[in-house]
Amino acid sequence: MSKYRQALPQADGRLFLSDGGMETALIFLQGVDLPQFASFVLLESESGRAELVKYYEKFLPIARSKNVGFVLDTATWRASLDWGEVLGFDADRLTAVNVAAIDLVAGLRDRWETPETPIVLNGAIGPRGDGYKAGRMDVAEAQDFQVEIFAGTQADMISAITMNTVNEAVGIALAARAADMPCVVSFTVETDGKLVDGTSLRAAIEATEEATGASPAYYMVNCAHPTHFEQALARDEDWVKRIRGVRANASAKSHAELDDSDTLDIGDIAGLSGHYKSLTRNFPSMRVLGGCCGTDHRHLAAISEAVVPI
């Protein structure tokens, strides 16, 4: 039984934190091998689940210490049929790991939630292709089977994360609407503030709104540095008010540069937290704050210090 599915607590305007760049932190900071950048493989072993708990429990104390909420993502960004096939997982095995991912974060909620720190369980769904390269699927193809799995668990919501095409975002949002699951759509942009296929962030959000009857609970931007998308935002426009969260990269490098790098770029932690402070001041609707590639608990601690009133 889900706890917040019928009324997401972040909808009332309070501040929520989230985690950072799960895969980069696991690989570079915890020394975990993730084939194809897939953290869901860890869910099949006790040692793997322990690594995930170790990762999560670096972030949850930050939210509790600040008396703010937390959106707790599952380790399922790659747990789709397409990536599962690449990694040798059939549909039954993928179903099991998606369910196990929710069970894991539900256990963490039992240990860490307080009245001042509500914890929302979020089923994470990544792109079926490469997050840095535009796909060519139609809307029907994009209605991911993960939505149906999460609908049968304790998940409070699902998020389509690192979306780089409108069709895939629309397909997942429509599947979520059919399953009566709250859905968040998070787009990623290039250094020019546009999706990799050249679609502007505004056009992507407005097209998704039109195609879905504005069914997403809200939108986010992730896997890009704030300097890449700040210029794409315009104050007081309706589409911007639908963006309620940011999960930025630590590095200001382009996706192509990050793809070619074999070292971790943690960027300027103080500078990144300053961007978050500016974003939340200029765009009050942005109330869900986390990190993406290259970020870890140190970035989130600095962000929380910058944006949470003393």
Image: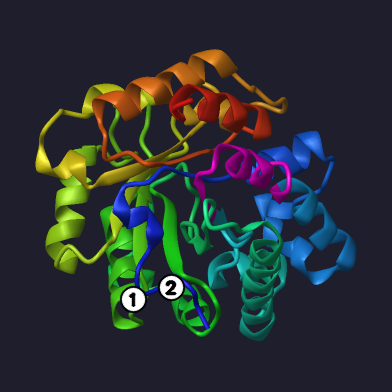
Across and down, in percent, residue 119 comes to: 54, 58
For residue 230, above or below residue 149:
above
CB within 8 Å, label 1 to label 2: yes
233 left or right, relative to 137: left
Q: Residue at x 84, y 40 (%)?
A: 31
- Which disc number belongs to residue 144? 2
Front residue of 104/62: it is 62
Image quarter of residue 45 = bottom right
Instruction: Check if residue 24 falls in the magenta segment.
Output: no
* Residue type beneath disc 2: Asp
Badge nearest the viewer, 1 or 2: 1
Instruction: Check if residue 65 falls in the magenta segment.
Output: yes
Across and down, in percent, residue 270 comes to: 55, 14
Q: Secondary structure at mark 2?
A: loop
Q: Secondary structure at mark 1?
A: helix
Q: Residue at x 25, y 31 (%)?
A: 283
Determine if residue 143 is in view.
yes
For residue 209, above or below residue 96:
above
* Residue type beneath disc 1: Ala
Q: Residue at x 46, y 57 (%)?
A: 127
- Which disc number belongs to residue 100? none
Neighbor class of circle 2 (other Cα within 10 Å; few <14, some 14-19, many 20+) is many
- Which disc number belongs to residue 175? 1
Front residue of 167/9: it is 9
Choose the circle earlier in sequence order: 1 or 2. 2
222 left or right, relative to 124: left
Please provide the residue range marked out in magenta: 56-71
Marks 1 and 2 sit apart, C-alpha to C-alpha, by 7 Å
Q: Residue at x 44, y 32 (%)?
A: 224
For residue 180, above or below residue 233:
below
